Amino acid sequence: MTRKPLIAGNWKMHNTTAEARELVVGVMQGVKEFEKSELPDIVVAPVFTSIPAVSEEIFEKCGCGKVALAAQNCYFEPKGAFTGEISIDMIKEFKAEYIIIGHSERRQYFGETDEMINSKAKAILAAGIIPIICCGETLEQREAGVTDAHIASQIVKALEGITPADVAKSVIAYEPIWAIGTGKTCDSVEANRVIAEIRKVVAQVAGRENADKIRILYGGSVKPSTIKEQMAQSDIDGALVGGASLKADDFVEIIKGAM
């Protein structure tokens, strides 16, 4: 089955509103020579405070439809006394099509659990938005030989109670934690092997047909120099890009590398 590639830029805690505007405009300018049908799906995920400005650039000023908007996180309750949290409807107001959940930094620094991520995934899908569900192992887990078992557990818990059809609409991002922001990149063949294992787990949860539909990305120090080899693998459907997404030229080169 042919799955359309997806390249998502996670800007993390970077960029003021003005910088975010400049960056997304640079990305859109970098792909303007291509038809949308030629490009992979392109997603940018700014900080919450820049979402309105980036949305304006994408949907009102450009109107090219080549770049989609994502949020980096959300809360699963629709409203309430949850100081500091952002609801899905607040994100949806600005035409976001994706929300990243379960990133290792959220798990490590903010104590997010598999159960919380599952609640978020259900609420995101109910709102008609696509969750990008992150999973991955630490260096200690890899060296202990429990990579596959650990990630399988993350995936099963994240997808619990979600219909097979909604599973197929979702996106999974495999990010070996030891390769995020370190300059280290998981060998493409090994990354593909892990992603193939993730697809097997999805097949157990939601059936083979839906496992063949779901897009599974690789993330972890993705660069213009690595993307072609990564995209040449059988099960890697795109990339969740961190640092390299903060420079328009680098991100555009990654996008082109996925074409």
Image (cartoon, rainbow, N blue to C red):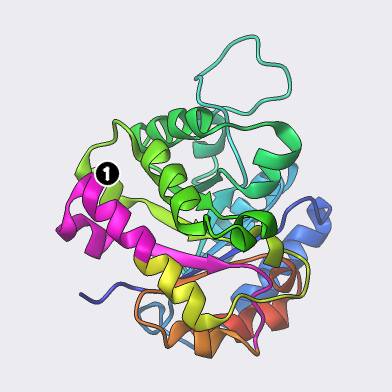
Q: Relative to residue 217, is residue 49 depicted above or below?
A: above
- Residue, far front: 144
Q: Relative to residue 33, is residue 85 depicted above or below?
A: above
Q: Relative to residue 58, is residue 70 depicted above or below?
A: above
Residue 259 shows in the view: no
Q: Quadrant of residue 110?
A: top right
Give, as a single range, the part of the protein colored magenta. Answer: 197-224
Q: Position of residue 7 (x, y in %)?
A: 51, 70
Give the amino acid type for the residue marked by disc 1 in the picture: Asp
Question: 229 or 26: which is nearer to us?
Answer: 229
Report the residue at 55% width, 37% height from top: 91
Q: Position of residue 49 (x, y in %)?
A: 74, 41
Question: 120 or 145: which is nearer to us?
Answer: 145
Q: Locate the N terminus and report the quarter of the image it occupies.
A: bottom left
Neighbourhood count class around disc 1 (C-alpha, 10 Å): few under 14, some 14–19, many 20 upward: some
Report the residue at 52% width, 28% height from top: 116
Report the residue at 54% width, 60% height from top: 145
For label 1, the SS is helix
Whether 154 is among the magenta residues is no
Left or right, residue 106 beside residue 39: right
Q: Position of residue 224 (x, y in %)?
A: 65, 86
Whether 203 is among the magenta residues is yes
Q: Locate the C terminus and report the quarter of the image it occupies.
A: bottom left
Left or right, residue 182 beside residue 82: right
Report the residue at 50% width, 73% height from top: 191
Left or right, residue 95 beside residue 167: right
Q: Position of residue 243 (x, y in %)?
A: 74, 68
Residue 77 shows in the view: yes
Which residue is disc 1 drawn over? 166
Report how many numbered discs are placed on residues in the image.
1
Question: 35 or 128: which is nearer to us?
Answer: 128
